[in-house]
Amino acid sequence: MIKINENYLKLKAGYLFPEISRRVNAFVAENPQAKVIRLGIGDVTRPLTPAITAAFQKGVEEMATDSGFRGYGPEQGYAFLREAIAINDFQSRGAEITADEIFISDGSKCDTGNIQEIFGLDNKIAITDPVYPVYVDTNVMAGRTGQADAKGQYGGLVYMPCTPENDFMPELPSQPVDIIYLCYPNNPTGAVATKAALQKWVEYARANKALILFDAAYEAFISNPDIPHSIYEIPGAKEVAIEFRSFSKNAGFTGTRCAFTVVPEELKAWTASGEAVSVKNIWNRRHCTKFNGVSYPVQAAAAAVYSEQGRQEVRGLVDFYMNNARTIREGLSKLGYKVYGGVDAPYIWLATPEGMGSWEFFDLLLNKANVVGTPGAGFGASGEGFFRLSAFGSYENVCQALERIAKI
Ligand SMILES: *Cc1c(COP(=O)(O)O)cnc(C)c1O
């Protein structure tokens, strides 16, 4: 008899986005003339830029020649890309990361989901609330949690509320934890982590032999020069942190697929008997066993992000989305909404008016303004009373959405 992994049965049904679709589809069926504007998506909309497309096409052409054909590449990624990343994303910011500490992959969703595999099941996991659901669900699948309660919180996890009162940066946990997931700039709150805030977490991790899993998928959207782009800008972080980066949001690679994970040489984890083990070696072993590399043309396209022209083009994409973010933030503020984020991140997190429930506000916005956003409660219990709007749309739609919201 085939036994299923029953941990999967603990997962709450993928609830948030299917429920949004259900409500939007029902509304459209009843109001076929309504022009619905979708500001709920966490996906980019602008096309790949010319320098990146040219490198992508050149990579494909090379593959079609005898001399340029490539079969399996290095599982960790081609040296040309790993070196460009080490120099441009880290060394240029004073973070001593080298190419051999970088692992190229097909996405940060996969990496943030897969990383927990190499750590013991008895680690205590801390996550922020609200949170990117991948961190939670993959630990449920692995068996690190009990069942979900009525609020949707799983037994065994440590939830760290992120609210306006703490600037969406969690307090240090009052009980010991081993693995801490942090995402800054944050999805969904749009908050950033200051150097001081990250320093506090790095010190906590060093003092407690804990690990920080730092998701920096949105670092390119930081505009404030004092905000660190990498956790490795914090002294001592190399001993306690893994960082996840992606080309998805900055360079429009959500459909092209390329990302990377940094696992520093210095990072250690321990056996039950207290023996130190190199995390990088274990992750390398896992990566080489379960992954066969990102395609050559895609890695060539990703490397073009670091060319002079590529850099300017990607800056243009980020500026485009951040102009939308500013427009949403300022427009809603003028209308009297309390808004957060949208300065160093492409998400605006707004407090629902008069303490309205986040699904209630979703229905109001859909019915009265024909605008779709994401209810905060979908990201965790502390997201109740909040609502996420994404800046990844067109400028025209953003302006029209604001005009309609003004009339509610
Ligand atoms: C979009 C996003 C990513 C990137 O995922 P990819 O698989 O690289 O497309 C990672 N983390 C968060 C929080 C995100 O929102």
Image: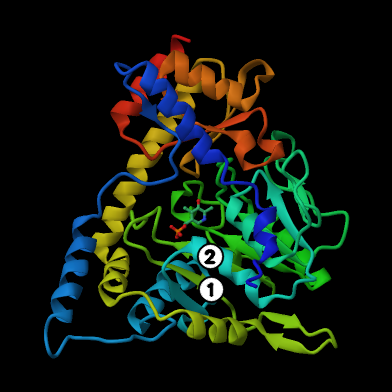
Residue 361 position by quadrant = top right
Give the x, y percent position of residue 369.
Answer: 43, 16
Give the x, y percent position of residue 232.
Answer: 59, 68
Task: Identify the residue shown where x is 31% and y is 44%.
Answer: 45
Task: Identify the residue shown where x is 78% and y is 85%.
Answer: 271
- Asked if one can make out residue 150 in the rendered structure from this viewpoint, the answer is yes
Task: Identify the residue shown where x is 45% and y is 81%.
Answer: 99
> Position of 369 compared to 224: left or right?
left
What residue is disc 2 on? 244
In this orientation, which residue lies closer to the viewer: 392 or 75?
Answer: 75
Q: Amino acid at mark 1?
A: Val
Q: Residue furthest front?
A: 1
Please name the colour scheme applied to the rendered image.
rainbow
> Position of 22 compared to 1: left or right?
left
Q: Is mark 2 within 8 Å of ligand 1?
A: yes
Give the x, y percent position of residue 376.
Answer: 60, 34
- Asked if one can make out residue 200 in the rendered structure from this viewpoint, the answer is no
What residue is disc 1 on? 262
Q: Quick one: label 2, few (<14), some, or many (20+) residues within 10 Å?
A: many
Callout 2–callout 1 Cβ contact below 8 Å? yes
Sequence-earlier tag: 2 or 1: 2
- The image shows residue 185, relative to residue 351, as above or below, that is below
- The image shows residue 62, relative to residue 231, as above or below, that is below
> Position of 140 compared to 327: left or right?
right
Label 2 to label 1, Cα distance in Å?
6 Å
Give the x, y percent position of residue 54.
Answer: 17, 65
